[in-house]
Image: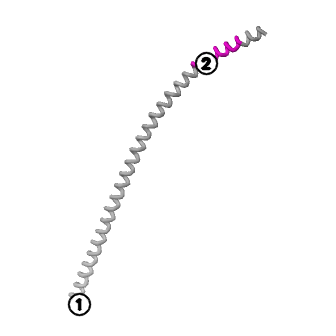
Amino acid sequence: MTNMLKVGVATAVIALGAGCTDLKPLQAEVDSLKSQVAKLSGDLDGVKTSADGASRAAAAAQQAATSAQNTANQAASAAQAAQQCCDANSEKLNRMFEKSMSK
């Protein structure tokens, strides 16, 4: 019985000793993973900053496009008014010409 107890204790000590030596590679992997997480966190911050910049640029482009559309609408309205004026002047000239030709 004593021999079995000694063998059991010796096995437990060997198992604990083997387990302790296996912790060092695991700790190295944990440290590696921590550094990778820190790097990815920094990369994520960079991507977020870029995305925020792109969002601001898109908003500015939208505002510029709206302004350009408004200017184009005003120009079209002015052109239409000028065409109506030109058509009215042409009509007046035609009436004057016809009136002078009929005399």
Residue 77 position in % (x across, y down): 31, 68
Corner quadrant of residue 73? bottom left
Q: Is residue 13 magenta?
A: yes
**Is residue 22 left or right of 39 when viewed as pictured?**
right
Q: Type of residue at label 1?
A: Ser
**Is residue 73 left or right of 11 when viewed as pictured?**
left
> Which residue position holds label 1?
102
Local crowd size for mark 1, using a 10 Å CA cut-off: few (<14), some (14–19), many (≥20): few
**Residue at the (44%, 39%) spot, across then down:** 47
Query: Gap in Å between the C-alphas at discs 2 and 1?
Result: 117 Å
**Residue at the (76%, 8%) spot, across then down:** 3
- Secondary structure category for the residue under label 2: helix
> Which residue position holds label 2?
22
Q: Which residues are magenta?
A: 9-24
**Is residue 57 left or right of 16 when viewed as pictured?**
left
Local crowd size for mark 2, using a 10 Å CA cut-off: few (<14), some (14–19), many (≥20): few
Quarter of the picture containing the N terminus is top right
Residue at the extreme bottom = 103
Mark linked to residue 48: none
Residue 41 position in % (x across, y down): 47, 34
- C-beta proximity under 8 Å, tags 2 and 1: no
